[in-house]
Amino acid sequence: MFFKKKDRKNPNGKAELITLNESVNFEKECIFVAIPKTGTTSIRTQLTQPGTPLIKNPHLNILQIKDSLYLYFLIKNLGTNYSFPNKAIPTDNELREKAKNTFESFFKFSAVRNPWARAVSLYFRNEGVKTKEKCSFEEFCTNHFYASDTCRHPTKHTNQLDWISDENGKVLIDYVYQLERFNDAIKDIETMTDGRLMLASQHKNNNPNSLSKKYRDLYTEKTKKIIAKRFEKDIDHFKYTF
């Protein structure tokens, strides 16, 4: 779902198409939580609807997405009354109920990645805050505290699990797959959505200079233990091993 906001026009004078965010696809009725450096670019490319996103940062956690649904429906309905009487204009309670129902009914999914491999990928990243030119890998591991601390728009979650959970730690999404098992996840997602969501295995935004596929070679016992302790929550929950 997207809409033409009448009071915003592009340089050609045409009404601008407004979408919510790359995280939400209204046509496929799905929500994707894009945790940085978990292979999100290929998924977002397949799910992005045409138009200008209301929130440009593609990396939103599940609560931010949930809250933004009401904002989207509110903006969508502001300034749309051109007749009297008009009983079709929704009330604020109806908009909030629509946002609630959308969040609850849409298929919500996300990807996670081996914390040791992900740390290497973050270290070698070409976008956001580039660290490999500023510090050694050991220094990076020592100061790597958050799951998105090298992003331009960091969300200060320690673990990947925090992106998909509420304030009490309850996971709010329907399906989490490990990036390392993406091909199996494609089949699961297609089945769980009754064929509505069919994803292709693509390789987008790959960094040829990253050593994440050979991540073990970069670690010492010291740095291995640093990552193990700091991201213990992810390692235990998703059953990752070095």
Image (cartoon, rainbow, N blue to C red):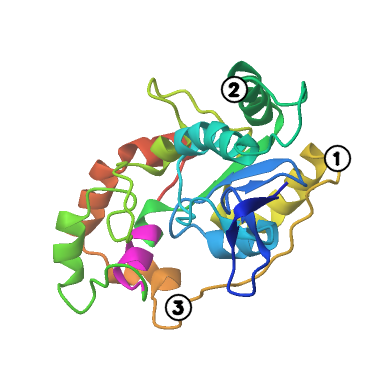
Q: Residue at x 62, y 39 (%)?
A: 79
Q: Amino acid at mark 2?
A: Arg
State the extent of the magenta-drawn residues as a range: 118-125
Q: Which residue is mark 3?
A: 207
Is tag 1's residue or tag 2's residue first in the polypeptide sequence?
A: 2
The nearer-to-camera label among 1 and 2 is: 2
Q: Which residue is mark 1?
A: 194
Magenta highlight: main SS: helix
Q: Residue at x 28, y 46 (%)?
A: 228
View extreme (right): residue: 195
Mark pair 3, 2: CA separation? 41 Å
User: With respect to residue 16, does 72 lie above or below?
Assistant: above
Quadrant in which the C terminus appears: bottom left
Mark pair 1, 2: CA separation? 28 Å
Dot 1 falls on a residue whose secondary structure is: loop
Dot 2 falls on a residue whose secondary structure is: helix
Q: Which residue is mark 2?
A: 96
Q: Amino acid at mark 3?
A: Asn
